[in-house]
Image: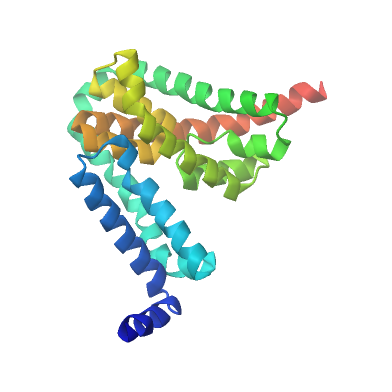
Amino acid sequence: MRDFVELWVYLSATPLFGLTATLVAYLAMHAASVRLGQPPWANPVLWTVLALAVLLTLSGTPYPTYFSGAQFIHFLLGPAVVALAWPMWQRREQLRRQGAALLVAGLTGGLAAAGSAVAFGWALGLPDEVLRSLAPKSVTAPVAMGIAEQLGGIPALAAVFAVLTGLVGALSGKYLFDGLRIPAPEVRGFALGTASHGIGAARAMQVHPDAGAYAGLALGLQVILASLLMPLALAALRILRNN
């Protein structure tokens, strides 16, 4: 017990704390998810976030102290997203034939995701800066933060909305698709990537390789479309208001 306390004191004072806690928590939650058959409700990302939140709260560890070590894992998010291109490359001929339809579906899905969120928030009377932070909720978190900043929102809040959206999609997608009787893995994957970005794509890859490939494509489309169109839409609204 004394050795454990000494190890805890050492880790909590160094960047190794955030790195070690994240790796241990995720590996434990992933192992539990696999043992349970990887049901949607046992999503390892969700339970890792909850476990780390409890750990930081109980130990009184400030988030900057935790992130000083966890940033090494955060850095790998970029290469992980780029790696999603490989399944798409393997299906490049099929995707090329469906290019126009996929573009229309991605644009429609992105408009529905952003428009419904903003409309619902407006109906609830949320402040303007919160609505601007809510608009890019279906874009992967790092990009959502940049878009929210351009729109005049709160980047940190946009990241929270994005993560929550991804988790909701990963947890509920299977049940929703089953209820709608949508069996095609390509359709399921594209819908998950459109609405739930990286977390949804990760779940799609667990279920079926084709679902994962289409989810990665949808994720990339949303990043491009949202980055280009959301600032333009805001500028157009400002012009209309001035006129």
Q: Residue furthest top?
A: 181
Q: Is residue 82 left or right of residue 114?
A: left
Q: Is residue 38 above or below residue 186?
A: below
* Residue at image coords 37%, 74%: 16
Number of numbered discs: 0
Q: Is residue 100 left or right of residue 92?
A: right
23 or 223, which is in the foreground? 23
194 or 57, which is in the foreground? 57
59 or 221, which is in the foreground? 59
* Residue at image coords 38%, 29%: 172
Rendering coords of residue 181 (x, y %): 29, 13
Q: Is residue 72 above or below residue 77?
A: below
* Residue at image coords 29%, 16%: 182
Rendering coords of residue 14 (x, y %): 43, 78
Rendering coords of residue 162 (x, y %): 49, 40
Q: Is residue 28 left or right of residue 152?
A: left
* Residue at image coords 30%, 24%: 188
46 or 100, which is in the foreground? 46
